[in-house]
Amino acid sequence: MSKKSKNSNPVYSTAKGRLCPNCGKPASQCKCGQGSSKPDNADGIVRLRREVKGRRGKTVTTVYGIPHNPQVLLELAGEIKKRCGTGGSVKAGVVVIQGDHRQTLKKVLEEKGYTVKLAGG
């Protein structure tokens, strides 16, 4: 019989969904405060990434990690699109801007007080 390691607690169950790593209860019922209290990418850093893969060769700049509600995100996306002079959209909390505008977006977001990192290639 093998010993169970401290670091081998389940964090997901197909029956219950996401589990708290400390108490083992579903994250929605967790009382210990370690459940899903913050989003997965909530480190406070906005990441700008240039992507081409899966977009038929078209380059887009994606903005990840903006911690706001959907309405504020849409307003910010509108302002970003105007500053870059291009189109874009918001999908699942990620702002997608057509073209490679990482340097422009970095300046705009830093003016707004965000910590920004250039990610990817």
Image: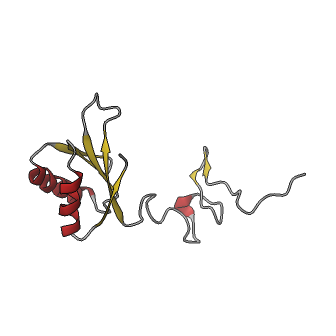
Front in this rendered view, residue 121 or 91: 121
Q: Quadrant of residue 114?
A: bottom left
Position of residue 48 measured from the top left corner of the image (x, y, whole percent)? 30, 53
Residue at 31 percent of width and 36 percent of height: 52
Front in this rendered view, residue 100 or 92: 100
Q: Can you say whether 55 is above or below 91 in the image?
A: above
Position of residue 9 measured from the top left corner of the image (x, y, whole percent)? 69, 57
Furthest residue in direction top, as rendered = 56
Q: Is residue 119 left or right of residue 108?
A: right
Q: Is residue 10 left or right of residue 51?
A: right
Position of residue 25 measured from the top left corner of the image (x, y, whole percent)? 62, 60
Residue at 56 percent of width and 68 percent of height: 34
**Labels in figure, total:** 0
Which colour assignment does the render follow?
secondary structure
Position of residue 71 measured from the top left corner of the image (x, y, whole percent)? 21, 57
Front in this rendered view, residue 47 or 79: 47
Residue at 19 percent of width and 62 percent of height: 107
Q: Is residue 120 left or right of residue 29?
A: left
Residue at 23 percent of width and 67 percent of height: 110
Front in this rendered view, residue 26 or 12: 12
